[in-house]
Image: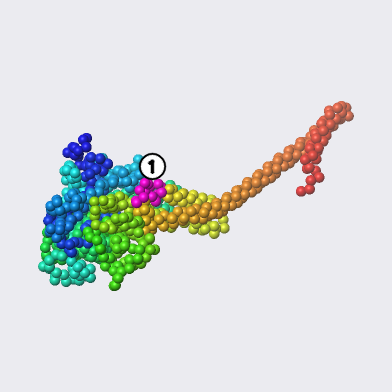
Amino acid sequence: MAKNDTASLTPEQANDVKNSDAYSFQGTKFPLPDGFTVAREDLPDWRLAHFAVILPVFPGALTSMDDTEWAPGRFRGIKSIEVPVWDAEAAAYRRATDIPRHLLDKAAYHYTPRVFLKGAHSRFRSPLDESVGAEAVDAVGGASECSPKHTRHKTSVCARRLLFRPDITPENGKTPPEDPRQKTRPGAEFVLVDDPEVLAAVGGSTRNLERFQGRALHNPHARISLACVEHLQYSGPGLRRIGTEDTEGTEGTANTANTAFQNDFLVFHVVAEHCSSAALEAISKSLFRSRNRVPLLPEYTPNPTHITEVRKENLLSLLLARFGETIGNTSLAFGNGGGLRWAQEKDGLTAGNPYTTITAIPAREGLELPQRMQQPGEQDLGPWTVHDAWAWFLATRADLFQPELTALDQHSLDASRVQLFRDWTVHSDENGLAVVRRAPIENANNFFWIHTGTRLVDLAILVRRADKYLAQMAKQLRAMTFGSTEIDQLRLKDEWSDDDIQKASSTLRRSLRNFEALQTELVVFRDHLWYESVSGRPVDTAVLRHMLLATGTRDNFDEIVSELELRKDIYATQADSIQVALDTVRRQKAQEKEEREKEQERQERRREAEEQERREALNINIAIAGLALAVPGLIDLWPRADDSHTEFWISLVVVLAIGAVLFSRLRSQGVFGRKD
């Protein structure tokens, strides 16, 4: 394919971040409105702020939606932002293209700086790229799903986005192919009433806003727009379920089988333009808690001049409603804490708290502190800068009620600030990450405005997935009793039956198997979800480590590891104790069995001896009877006067010989002389 031949690109090829011919197309643009003209004193404080609101959602909540208009892959970020130029002749800030060329210090394109996207594949090395699902994130080959091939643990990632403004855009005179999914949708842009009195009235819960109708708009260019909504699904690795000792099954039952570990997210990309500091505060609050409102005009118009009506809206709820109107009813709503509730989920639970990555770019020098951080008199910032204060305010998602204001000292700065750059400051908190530019836009050092809403969102979601996995492991540890209750109940018995021994042995094997499963899960977790650095990316590494600390995920991991190590020793002792008890019972059973067998053998020998004596006694009786029967024969053989004595004497000798032999045997066997 020729390098400049873009006409032959298909929409899928143009959407593929790894496709070098589509490299310059990636990202959305934010130009100035036509005819932009603002006096010096009316130039808004902030040129642009990008909020990527990461919302956990219940798996299955969006399964029935029509996804034909969803593009594969993640949001491509912000590619270019046009900034106004001071026109001395007009005494106003205007678009560079509207100013005569000879009045410009630089070429017009210098005032529309560009940043090109780094895809997940190019930014993250293996195996981190597989853990974040780089193939799906970058829509390689036009696919929205991927499954890593170099692991035996079943995992998959699905990434798709619903665009409200195109993020595949023309560049350098080249135009991407037409794609019906890349279009500007109506109803996703709102006019913000950026008026100090109106903002104060709405923030103070004033109900009567009719008095502002007809007032000229103080800042007619203030806008809030929904750029994109992402639906991200992460499946795996498998996670075993371990119940309590009452619900644990026996060996081979289904409760020990691997079950799916699913994480679903909606990511709302919201952009605010040409806002005052007070308006940016209100927007930040409204994108975190449903109790906070912003003033909007009822309808969007390109060039409004007056306030027709002021509508108090919570941005989270408003944007969710616009999203629902686009894809159909989702049965989703925001809870008081900012998390998403699903109508089909019982007890009104939310899927989890939101986490937001924010990029804020000022339009002017000399910003003031956020209103909540201002104090009467001169403000001593100490080691902080005003941009640090804004980054802290945005990262903590602070509003009127929480969190507690930080002290502006070195300790609090070290705890909040991730890193300080020449043109940017980065702060992190449990609720978000804020990257604030320290000066108005120049045509250099602008990488963060595309990076924060893309690759840093990948890292934020990875941390959230890791934290959820650790939370499940903690539940398993609490549920695991190692069968101690069952064993203790058996120990109270005076005697153990064979069933008792079998039950104790089975309990021990099941407990050891469950603990082994927990140890295996920790290994799998480290392979797939636990990272403490991003290889070759020091900035990403610093952000990731601070995210782990600020969200408590680092502490949760350390606690799980130490708990497993502690329980390994405790369970080893318990297992040895139980095994000793089982061995003792088995030895006792074996000894008892051996004694029973010996007793049976003795009884058998006794019975055999008695039987032998009985037989011998019978033989003796028979012999005596035979001798007795021989006497009449001898008498008959007694010689008469005329007979010979030979037969008699022979018979007598035979009888006497037999009697002598019989007597000798009886004597040798102790029949005679034995005392019973």
Counting from the top left corner in percent of width and height, residue 131 is at 35, 47
197 on left or right of 60: left
Q: Amino acid at mark 1?
A: Arg
Q: Residue at x 22, y 37 (%)?
A: 3
Q: Residue 604: horizontal and vertical position, in percent? A: 66, 44
- Residue range corresponding to the magenta coloring: 524-540
Which corner quadrant of the image does residue 351 belong to?
bottom left
Query: What sort of colour scheme is used for the picture?
Result: rainbow
Q: Nearer the viewer, residue 96 or 179?
A: 96
Horizontally, is 97 left or right of 460 in the view? left
Q: Residue 533 placed where, x, y %?
A: 38, 50
Where is residue 625 drawn, in percent x and y?
Answer: 76, 38
Q: Residue furthest right?
A: 641
Q: Reply above or below: 370 against 230.
A: below
Give left or right: position of 386 versus 489.
Answer: left
Does the image show residue 648? no
Q: Secondary structure at mark 1?
A: loop
Whether residue 527 is visible to the viewer of this picture, yes or no, is yes
Q: Rate crowding at label 1 as few (under 14), some (14 to 19) or many (20 or more) other CA atoms within 10 Å.
A: few
Residue at the image position 76 percent from the left and 37 percent from the top = 623
For image coordinates 23% across by 49% down, the residue present is 114
Residue at horizontal 53%, vertical 51%?
A: 501
What residue would you read off at disc 1?
152
> Which of these two is toward me, 623 or 536?
536
- Vertical comparison of 427 with 614: above or below: below
The relative height of residue 222 versus residue 129 in the rendered view (above or below) is below
In this rendered view, identify the residue nearer to me: 492 or 50. Answer: 50
Magenta segment includes 533? yes
In the rendered image, which quarter is residue 673 located in? top right
Locate the N terminus by quadrant: top left
Q: Is residue 674 magenta?
A: no
